[in-house]
Image (cartoon, rainbow, N blue to C red):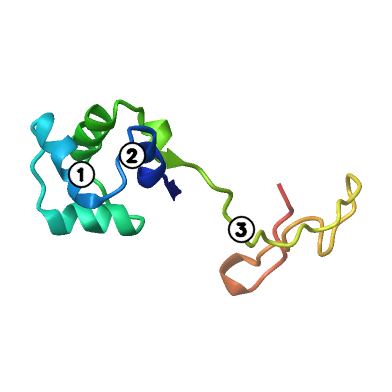
Amino acid sequence: MKWNLRWAAARRDIWRPSDLKTAFEQVGFTPSLSKVAALWSAKPVTVRLDDLDMICAALNCTVADLLEAEPVAVDLPQERPRQAVGETDGPARPTPRRRGGRGPLLPPN
């Protein structure tokens, strides 16, 4: 996820964490200045949904304005080459077991 708090704040002509804190207080959101500065300076690891609602109210924006999905590089398992029906890498059926360890083989089902 990309954290766009500064961009959303700039749209409201807010350029410093202290000004952002004032905007938060106007909607009843009262985080400490250190928390506001942390939200301002870096992407947070977690954000409470209630806090996210208050941030959106203060900046008159949506969650989509604050958070932007970014593609994540994922190592996918190597795809096996496709095989024709009936073509197998090993035995086509399980090997039958012997009864009690001796005697004749049981016929396959």
Numbered circle sitting on residue 73: 3
Residue 24 picture location, percent across and down: 16, 37
- Residue 45 visible in the displayed image: no
Q: Nearer the viewer, residue 83 or 49?
A: 49
Residue at figure coordinates x 89%, y 48% from the top left? 86
User: For this view, does 27 lie left or right of residue 53?
Assistant: left
Q: Nearer the viewer, residue 32 or 73?
A: 32
Residue 71 picture location, percent across and down: 58, 49
User: Which of the two marks, 1 or 3, is nearer to us in this view?
Assistant: 1
Are the residues at dot 3 and dot 2 in contact (C-beta closer than 8 Å)? no
Along the polypeptide, which appears first: circle 1 or circle 3? 1
Q: CA distance from mark 2 to mark 1?
A: 9 Å
Numbered circle sitting on residue 86: none
Along the polypeptide, which appears first: circle 2 or circle 1? 2
Three-letter amino acid code at the position of disc 2: Ala
Three-letter amino acid code at the position of disc 3: Ala
Q: Which residue is mark 1?
A: 19
Q: Mark 3 packing: few (<14 Cα in 10 Å), some, or many (20+)?
A: few
